[in-house]
């Protein structure tokens, strides 16, 4: 899967998995922070994103410090998925 296609798919999954009713996948910028001032996600959402990575891509994140480095923005998540996916 090409990077652009993976970004589109990931944005759709983020909206679906986190039940973001007021956000459309195309509204999420690739370099927009997912937490804080960006998309405004919280710690519960980070757990959901870790579950998403596990279910959809076979990526297990056990160390919270590693998770914080991965769940920065869509670009960072896609780069990590491309390197580590098992599905």
Image (cartoon, rainbow, N blue to C red):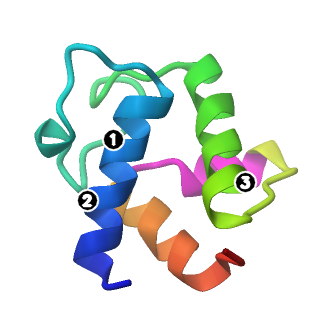
Callout 2 secondary element: helix
**Residue 11 in the image: above or below residue 39:** below
To which quarter of the image does residue 34 belong? top left
**Residue 37 in the image: above or below residue 11:** above
Q: Earlier in the sequence, mark 2 or mark 3?
A: 2
Using residue 35 as the reference point, say whether residue 7 is left or right of it.
left
User: Cα distance, mark 2 to mark 3?
Assistant: 18 Å
Q: Are marks 2 and 1 in contact (CB under 8 Å)?
A: no
Magenta-drawn stretch contains 17: no
Residue bearing mark 1:
33
Callout 3 secondary element: helix
Residue bearing mark 3:
54
Q: Residue at x 69, y 51 (%)?
A: 55
Q: Earlier in the sequence, mark 1 or mark 3?
A: 1
| Disc nearest the viewer among 1 and 3 | 3
Q: Residue at x 39, y 54 (%)?
A: 10
**Residue 64 placed where, x, y %?**
78, 43
Callout 3: 10 Å neighbours few (<14), some, many (20+)?
A: some
Callout 2: 10 Å neighbours few (<14), some, many (20+)?
A: some
In the orientation shown, which residue stands out farthest toward the right? 62
User: What main secondary structure does the magenta stretch of the protein show?
Assistant: helix
**Residue 19 placed where, x, y %?**
41, 19
Residue bearing mark 2:
8
Magenta-drawn stretch contains 68: yes
Foreground of the two, 85 or 40: 85
Callout 1 secondary element: loop
**Residue 35 placed where, x, y %?**
42, 30
In the rendered structure, which segment of residues is drawn in magenta?
A: 65-73
User: Cα distance, mark 1 to mark 3?
Assistant: 21 Å
């Amino acid at each position: 899967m090409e990077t652009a296609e993976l970004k589109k798919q990931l944005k759709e999954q983020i909206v679906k998995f986190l039940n973001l009713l007021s956000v459309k996948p195309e509204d999420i910028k690739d370099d927009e922070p997912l937490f804080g001032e960006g998309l405004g996600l919280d710690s519960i959402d980070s757990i959901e994103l870790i579950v998403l990575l596990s279910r959809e891509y076979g990526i297990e994140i056990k160390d919270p410090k590693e998770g914080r480095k991965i769940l920065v923005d869509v670009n960072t998540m896609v780069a990590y998925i491309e390197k580590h996916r098992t599905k």
